[in-house]
Image (cartoon, grey):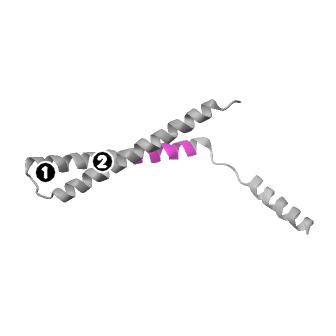
Amino acid sequence: MNSVADITMKAHLQGLAETKPAPIQNISGKFAEALKDSLSEVNQAQIAADRAAEQVAAGKTKNLHEAMIKLEEADISLRMVVQVRNKVVEAYQEVMRMQV
């Protein structure tokens, strides 16, 4: 029974050795692109919420419900971005505290 586990472990380790990690540039580029896209979406939500609030205030529309929904969506997305930023800063600080 012990030899079966050894074979399985050996096969598993060989499988790991055959895989090549993705280049760092590709990973950082994908992360940067995803971050850029997310921030762009949050910005668009903020702009749409501002326009909706302006239209309600100017009396151009009477659809207060849609304006409030857009404002809440923008608020929630901004809160999420702030929390992600906080987690990234916290992770960076933790890495910087590590002793080499």
Residue type, numbered disc 1: Val
Answer with left or right where residue 7 lies relative to residue 57.
Answer: right
Q: Residue at x 25, y 45 (%)?
A: 47
Q: Is residue 28 covered in magenta?
A: yes
Q: Residue at x 51, y 36 (%)?
A: 89
Mark 2, secondary structure of its residue: helix
Q: Residues within 10 Å of mark 1 (few under 14, many from 20)?
A: some
Label 1 belongs to which residue? 56
Front position in the image: 100 or 21? 100
Residue type, numbered disc 2: Gln
Label 2 belongs to which residue? 44
Front position in the image: 35 or 20? 35
Q: Residue furthest bottom?
A: 1
Q: Residues within 10 Å of mark 2 (few under 14, many from 20)?
A: few
> Which of marks 1 and 2 precedes in the sequence?
2
Please give the range of residues in magenta: 27-38
Chief secondary structure of the magenta portion: helix
Residue 9: percent from left, percent from top? 83, 60
Residue 92: percent from left, percent from top? 56, 35
Q: Is residue 46 above or below residue 99?
A: below
Position of the C terminus by quadrant:
top right
Total labels: the figure holds 2
Answer with left or right where residue 14 lies relative to residue 92.
Answer: right
Please indicate, yes or no, whether residue 41 appears anywhere in the rendered image: no
Snapshot quadrant of residue 1: bottom right
Q: Residue at x 13, y 49 (%)?
A: 55
Q: Residue furthest left?
A: 59
Residue 49: percent from left, percent from top? 24, 49
Mark 1, secondary structure of its residue: helix
